[in-house]
Image (cartoon, helix red, strand yellow):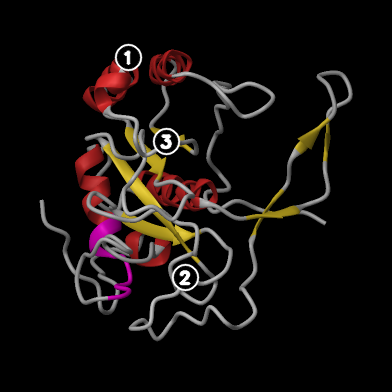
Amino acid sequence: MGLTGLAYGATIMPVRVLDDHGEGDASDIAAGVRFAVRHGAQVINLSLEFSTDVTASEIPELVDALAYAHRRGVFLVGASGNEAHRSVAYPARARYVVSVGATTEHGCLSDFSNQGTGLDISAPGGGADAVIEDDPNCHPAEKPGRDIYQVTLEGGPKNRRFGIPGGYEGTSMAAPHVAAAAALVIATKVIGAHPTPGAIEERLKSTARDLGAPGPDTRYGAGLLDAAAATAPGTTAPGATKAPE
């Protein structure tokens, strides 16, 4: 049994910035970002988060590294956070990072997904539906949709093997969908041979499927990522709206 990724032809550069417990500090993450940029990364996915009460002034080295990556033309993606807070967590909240919230299989906001001002777009993250009475896609009392599956490497360097595909949920699962879609936009050259991070962001947002209240909102951002529409020449997804600059 195997799985394939959304951008299955992409070259992955795994850069370890957290320890065995999934913990780390801003300086290590910043070093990882700069390493990836220096070694030719075109898209950087940040499936990690600080507490929502952490401010930019507390992680200056990471904020600087993200600005450095942006200046070098790298598209940055970050997970909004999994505490169901009304604010986006860093590094997704940083200026040059596209912040990604999670949706369920039903097209509802995942009940754990952070939301709020600065949320850019949503993508599949699994889990149960949030309680949103005015959203017809949300059915929190019913059976949750399926989670996101992935294959994980197990074992040490000399006996590494693929583990059994497992289901996961979180904005850390949603963010890679956006990173992969960005890779497809770059590879297909649908908006040019060398699109800027801003052009890629606009393409993904303008082709997203609108969810929730009409237009961009604090629950879903520009809407649900639509990789097919984003890579189709000259098309915009039905119901999509152009996000403000």
Q: Position of residue 209 (x, y in %)?
A: 33, 71
The range drawn in magenta is 204-212
Image quadrant occupied by the N terminus = bottom right
At label 2, counting other C-alpha atoms closer than 10 Å, the crowd grade (few under 14, some 14-19, many 20 or more) is many
Residue 62: which quarter of the image? Answer: top left
Asked if the residue at tag 1 contacts the one at tag 3, i.e. Cβ–Cβ closer than 8 Å, the answer is no
At label 1, counting other C-alpha atoms closer than 10 Å, the crowd grade (few under 14, some 14-19, many 20 or more) is some
- Give the structural element (helix, strand or loop) at label 3: loop
Residue hosting label 1: 61
Residue hosting label 2: 130
Image position of 171 (left or right of 226): right
Which of disc 2 and disc 3 is earlier in sequence?
3
At label 3, counting other C-alpha atoms closer than 10 Å, the crowd grade (few under 14, some 14-19, many 20 or more) is few
Find the distance from the CA under tag 3 to the CA under tag 1: 17 Å
> Could you say which is closer to the camera, residue 25 or residue 73?
25
Q: Which residue is painted at 28% across and 60% down in the image?
A: 221
Find the distance from the CA under tag 2 to the CA under tag 1: 35 Å
The amino acid at mark 3 is Ser
Vertical side of 231 occupied by 106: above or below: below
Image position of 245 (left or right of 1): left
Is residue 198 visible in the rendered structure shown here?
yes
Residue hosting label 3: 51
Which of disc 1 and disc 2 is earlier in sequence?
1
Q: Position of residue 90 (x, y in %)?
A: 35, 35
Which of disc 1 and disc 3 is earlier in sequence?
3
